[in-house]
Image (spheres, rainbow, N blue to C red):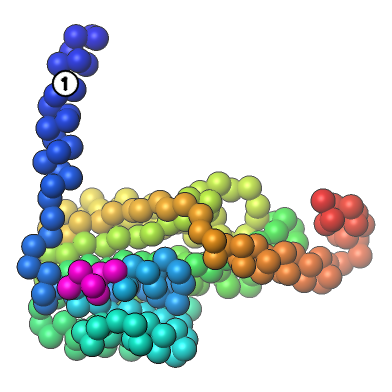
Amino acid sequence: LHIAILASIPSLIIYWLIRDRYRVRNLNGKHVFITGCDTELGNSLAKWLDKKGFCVIAACTTEKGSQELRSCSSLSLKTVNLNLADSKSIARAVEFVTEQTAGKGLFGLVSNAEGTAPVGPTDWLRIEDFHSVLDISLLGLIEITLKLLPLLKKAEGRVINLINAKGLMAFVGGGYSLSKWGMEAFSDTLRIEMQHFGVKVSIVEHGFFKAEVVNSDIIEKYLFKLWNRLTPETRDSYGEKYLIE
């Protein structure tokens, strides 16, 4: 067994060297649509791909985010406002992408959207608290992916779903971890189904960023908000010490 393992190592090294040397050629005219470009990760990725020569279509949740991105990018980078919790907004974004690609299809879809709060003990939450996260981070991303599949199939493109690794650690209640596990399952299923059409589906599980300190402040704010709306009976069952610790 040990001999077989040692014999396979050179083959693996050769495979890795060949794989790592692979590069996408002829970037001009290849359109990449990225969601969540107001945030640090999506924003940085849009700028980087723009410099590489891709035709970037960046979705932002605010006009301010769109203006900031356009101000420091090439003229080929386009922005579109997108609210993933709104089907009409998704439809407008898909129409914009269809117009921009002009029959060429979509080379890449990068899904990067974070709906984090509220999170907290499960029996502090209401069903609308789950919707506020899942409608953006799971259902919204699934909806826009489904509507862009015809363009992706036409270009034999790729879907890349960025998933924060912290969301795969279910240590607190709420929709955040549910959305990340849901995107994992959706991606795995879609990968198998899209092989027939030459469309690749990948998951990138990334780590933590400085911007998440701000997210921690938001989460703490929501915890106190959830606590204050609890019934006296529920608060008594936990005690004030639970919230402080």
Q: Which residue is mark 1?
A: 8
Instruction: Give the left or right position of residue 67, taking residue 118 as reference.
Output: left
Kindly give the residue lying farthest to the left in the view shown: 26
Kindly give the residue lying farthest to the front in the view shown: 72
Q: Which quarter shows the N terminus?
A: top left
The residue sitting at 16% across, 53% down in the picture is 195
The residue sitting at 65% across, 62% down in the picture is 216
Instruction: Give the left or right position of residue 241, taking residue 177 as reference.
Output: right
Q: Is residue 28 above or below residue 205?
A: below
Q: What secondary structure predominates along the stretch shown in magenta?
A: helix
Residue 150 within the magenta-colored segment of the rendering: no
Q: Is residue 185 visible?
A: yes
Q: Position of residue 68 (x, y in %)?
A: 41, 85
Which range is magenta? 48-53
Residue 49 within the magenta-colored segment of the rendering: yes
Q: Is residue 155 above or below residue 80?
A: above
User: Hey, which quadrant is residue 32 in on the image?
Assistant: bottom left
Neighbourhood count class around disc 1 (C-alpha, 10 Å): few under 14, some 14–19, many 20 upward: few
Q: Position of residue 169 (x, y in %)?
A: 55, 46
User: Hey, which quadrant is residue 182 in on the image?
Assistant: bottom left
Q: Position of residue 173 (x, y in %)?
A: 65, 55
The residue sitting at 51% across, 54% down in the picture is 208
Give 115 or 234, whichever is nearer the viewer. 115
In the rendered structure, which amino acid carries the disc numbered 1?
A: Ser
Q: Position of residue 101 (x, y in %)?
A: 16, 82
